[in-house]
Image (cartoon, rainbow, N blue to C red):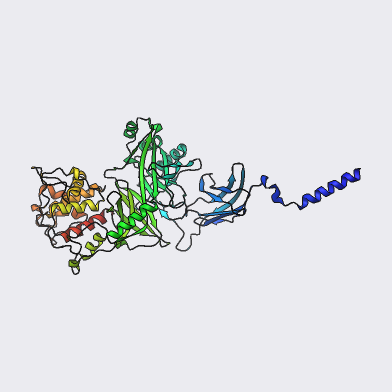
Amino acid sequence: MKLRQLNIMVVIMLCLSLVPVTAFANSVAVSINAIGSVAQGGNVDISGTSALDEVIIKVLRPDNSVVFYTIAPVSEGKFSSSFTLAGRETTGTYKVVAGQADQVGTLNFNVTAASTGGTGGSVPIGTIETPGAGKPITPPTSNASPVTVDTSKNVVSSETASNGRAATIVKQEDAALADALAKAAKQDNHGDAPIVFIAYDNPAGETVQFNLSSAVLAAAVTGAPNTIISLQTNDGEYSLPLSIIDFAAIAQSLGAASTGVSIQVTIAAAGADLDAEIKKNALGISTSQLGKAIEFTITAAGNGKSVELNQFGSVYVERNVVLAAPADVAHTTVVLYDPLTGKFSFVPAVFEKQADGSMKITFKRNGNSIYAVLSSTKSFNDISKHWAKADIELLASKLVVNGVTDSSFAPNNQITRSEFAALLVRSLGLSLDAASADFTDVKSSDWFAGAVGAAVKAKLVDGFSDKSFKPNDTITREQMAVMIARAITAAGIASNAAGESNDSLAPFNDKASISGWAQTAVAQAVEAKIITGMTEDTFFPSANATRAQAVVMLKRLMQYAHFIN
């Protein structure tokens, strides 16, 4: 009997020894392949096997904040994914977590310091990088080092965004946001605004809405009112200055306590239908679209209500996108697209070629909308030998100046008050506003009504005591200087020319003929090298300017304001 039992046990053991280990996969649902050490800025390749249909992959930094997150499908028992580390990523031991619920596998790997030899690999202070592609994105004039917000406790869901489109909603955890804001405010930002950075690694083209606590942001403003929240996806980046948000007024308008209000920033690549519409309308004005259009919106929500935030006064909010291929800066421009009219208008933008050959575009405007990048080459028959040919073609290609006809610019014609107002409005990227043009000699049907109204609203121009604007009068050089000085202020640039007018005007023998009301403005324009004398020692304040002269002044103004390269 005992011998029979022993024989049965031997048979069972032999059978078990022939059963593959994968038959017990329930206890080991995920296995991750080993990962070697990875240098800062390097690629991390994650792969493994699993009995699940799909696995959630998270990679944690040494401080347990999330550096990478994705959902990978499992095909024939295998899964894989990869991402690129930031050039300034923390060194140390990172953890990969893959699986679902309690069926997970983990693996550690090391991130080492990048080599400092040679000419590449380093990332300048103040640079942050896109979540997936490693493209540097930062306000180009900032020396502040962005503080990365811990996103490990964020809640991510799929819902309908504030713009009505299906989107991934990223709710930033309040405590982590408050901690990052406090750290950014306390550190040495080298004289620039504190910046905190939140990124979401979305599939390209997927709409992302970041939800931030209004109460947390309002608290940060009390100690550091110029703080910037940099929100970034793989489609674009939005630098949100907290100074543009009136938190108390928003809460009151929504009838909600500040703790119940959410500031929602949406970054959405244009859908196929809208992109096709933009391409078609671009061809209609002899331009072509580069890349995909993108839309940015800010909404405040609370108490079951919402309000869109879209008027930022003289604060120009920066956004960043990256073109995969280089572009000719002189013939490339960012535009606002109006889907109601199908028309485009210039948006201030600076182009920067990156080490990998791509083109980073930093554009800014005092409102939100749909934006596209266009390539255009424009010239006129009557400027082929004109001294201002290059500047006229530059601003015409950027949709800032128009000809008197499609083929003629009339460069030597004297420019009128309405024409110069229109040029300033376009160069600042302002929206037309015919309703604000309340003058007896400006009709709503006039081509310049919207531009004059926008100029009045931005405090670029004034009318006369008889409530007229005199749109067809020629404009003098000192009048232009006043409008340019006001445009500099409208662009958010401070000036100290008021205390230096005597020095700036000293070279001009006719400085006494400059009207008292224009002297400070002329000094500011001369100091900024936007307007020069007619000769080395004469300014001729009452002389009229030509259309070509106005274009040259406008180009200098835009470069001074960093509105073009």
Q: In the rendering, at what x and y percent does residue 12 appear? A: 81, 48
The quarter of the picture where the N terminus appears is top right
Residue 317, given in percent of the width and then of the height, sits at: 32, 47
Q: Looking at the image, which is closer to me, 295 or 359?
A: 295
As drawn, 477 above or below 444? below
| 126 left or right of 67 in image | left
- The residue nearer to you, when weighing 330 against 508, is 330
Residue 484 shows in the view: yes
- The answer to whether residue 96 of the structure is visible from this angle is no
Viewer-proximal residue among 526 and 559? 559
- Where is residue 183? Give x, y as percent: 43, 41
Q: Residue 267: give x, y in percent of width and height.
A: 39, 47
Q: How many numbered marks appear?
A: 0
Q: Quadrant of residue 308?
A: top left
Check the image and report above or below for 455 versus 257.
Answer: below
Identify the residue at image location x=9%, y=56%.
510
Quarter of the rendering occupied by the C terminus = bottom left
Asked if residue 534 lies left or right of residue 303, the reply is left
Outermost bottom residue: 385
Q: Is 119 on the left-hand or right-hand side of 423? A: right
Residue at (20, 69) in percent of width and height: 384
Position of 300 relative to 88 (above/below): above
